[in-house]
């Protein structure tokens, strides 16, 4: 049985937090909101508890977990060394959606790091995550709280859809304010490498530590190079519907929309499949004349934060509506555009560049 506690996201009830912390301390699994997506947490020092995460998610053992800590003063519990660059980034962006890779302290069990000598660490800013860390007094290993391969959860209902009956408790703190996972930055390489673009943008990072590289996968126009991190698998964020991404390489929205309109007819007429569209406020009018077309706006074209916040929920809504094919475009590579494109690429079974 999975218990659900509705909790105030800004002023979490200490009794509910104590209950959740007790589950963490005794080796159980708690799903909790972070500012990015819901995490599925377990005591990071307890390899059996960590093993339960892999089982609940159906996650392969070669995909390492992020260890969550309350703040930088906890770092020496989980890592053995930090660089001056790490210190600058931690001071600037923690607590927040930035995950850094460090040499692992032996206290961190090897199933957390998938057998590797490096551990990914972040301090989440969400008040519920902060309160849970403080009350449990333990670093919490937490991947996104979805079944492996499915879209990350940004609402408690998403967690329950995937994991009900498989975990002990869900703290329902409403919608996650960022809605895209943290940026994963590998500082053990020089120059540092963004393994996964996310809530903290490349530009923000470069203002603090200078140039960073992008893992090959995230560069536009590249093929399917082998992944430096096993978690950076293709199709990592797939909705159950087939997603076709019209990748907008020129920034010309008209060309992308024209391609989507073409694909709508082709998919419906030739393949006889139902279609859903993920679009933006400024472009919904292009799709108004179609009958039986599910159209979801992710927000305004001028507000990438809004688009990012609504992206995963939009995919899940179309999937639940039973749509067979989802058509969408990306929104450039500046700021959060990079993370949005990355998630769309991973979700896509087919990418058409225009
Ligand atoms: O925003 C987030 O990061 C959320 C919330 C819950 O904190 N967590 C999350 O965890 O997205 P997960 O497990 O779904 O994604 C973690 C990513 C994976 O791509 C994994 O491969 C990578 O981080 N990662 C974890 N440990 C690593 C390591 N030691 N070296 C390289 N990559 C690592
Ligand atoms: Mg995940």
Image: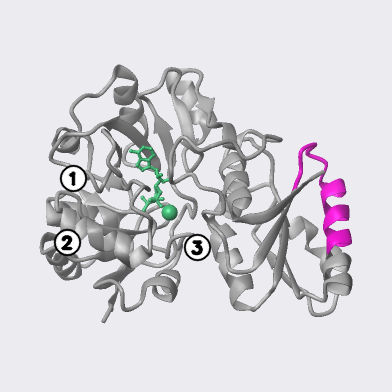
Q: Give SS at disc 3.
A: loop
The answer to whether residue 11 of the structure is visible from this angle is no
Q: Give SS at disc 2.
A: helix
Does the residue tagged 1 have its C-beta within 8 Å of any atom of ligand 1? Answer: no
Residue 181: x and y, percent? 45, 49
> In whole angstroms, how far apart are the C-alphas of marks 3 and 2?
24 Å
The answer to whether residue 66 of the structure is visible from this angle is yes
Between residues 317 and 225, which one lies in front from this camera angle? 225
Q: Which mark is residue 24?
A: 2
Q: Give SS at disc 1.
A: loop
Q: Quadrant of the N terminus?
A: bottom left
Q: Quadrant of the C terminus?
A: top right
Disc 2 vs disc 1: which is toward the camera? 1
Residue 205: x and y, percent? 46, 28
> In whole angstroms, how far apart are the C-alphas of marks 2 and 1?
16 Å
Q: Which corner quadrant of the image does residue 310 belong to? A: bottom right
* Residue 17 within the segment the image draws in magenta: no
Q: Which corner quadrant of the image does residue 221 belong to? A: top right
Q: Which mark is residue 150?
A: 3
116 sits to left or right of 23: right
112 sits to left or right of 212: left
Sequence-wise, which precedes: disc 2 or disc 1? 2
Q: Which mark is residue 283?
A: none
Q: What range of the chain is rendered magenta?
A: 247-263
The residue positioned 63% from the left and 45% from the top of the image is 341
């Amino acid at each position: 049985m999975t218990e659900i506690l509705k909790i105030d996201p800004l002023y979490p009830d200490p009794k509910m937090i104590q209950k959740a912390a007790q589950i963490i301390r005794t080796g159980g699994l708690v799903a909790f909101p972070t500012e990015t997506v819901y995490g599925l947490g377990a005591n990071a020092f307890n390899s059996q508890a960590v093993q339960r995460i892999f089982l609940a998610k159906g996650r392969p053992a070669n995909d390492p977990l992020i260890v969550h800590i309350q703040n930088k003063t906890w770092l020496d519990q989980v890592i053995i060394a930090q660089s001056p660059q790490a210190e600058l980034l931690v001071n600037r962006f923690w607590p927040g959606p930035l995950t850094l890779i460090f040499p692992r302290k032996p206290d961190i069990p090897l199933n957390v790091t998938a057998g590797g000598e490096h551990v990914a660490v972040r301090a989440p800013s969400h008040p519920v995550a902060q309160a849970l860390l403080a009350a449990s007094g333990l670093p919490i290993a937490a991947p996104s709280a979805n079944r492996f391969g499915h879209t990350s959860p940004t609402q408690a209902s998403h967690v329950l859809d995937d994991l009900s009956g498989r975990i002990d408790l869900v703290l329902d703190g409403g919608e996650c304010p960022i809605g895209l996972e943290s940026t994963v930055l590998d500082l053990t390489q020089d120059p540092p490498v963004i393994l996964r673009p996310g809530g903290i943008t490349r530009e923000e990072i470069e203002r603090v530590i200078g140039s960073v590289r992008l893992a090959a996968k995230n560069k536009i126009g590249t093929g399917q190079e082998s992944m430096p991190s096993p978690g950076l698998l293709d199709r990592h964020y797939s909705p159950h519907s087939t997603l076709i991404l019209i990748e907008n390489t020129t920034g010309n929205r008209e060309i992308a929309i024209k391609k989507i309109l073409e694909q709508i007819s082709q998919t419906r007429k030739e393949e006889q499949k139902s279609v859903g569209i993920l679009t933006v406020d400024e472009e919904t009018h292009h799709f108004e004349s179609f009958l039986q077309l599910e159209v979801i706006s992710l927000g305004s074209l001028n507000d990438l934060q809004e688009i990012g916040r609504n992206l995963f929920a939009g995919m899940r809504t179309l999937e639940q509506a039973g749509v067979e094919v989802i058509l969408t475009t990306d929104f450039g590579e500046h700021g959060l555009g990079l993370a949005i494109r990355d998630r769309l690429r991973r979700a896509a079974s087919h990418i058409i560049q225009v």
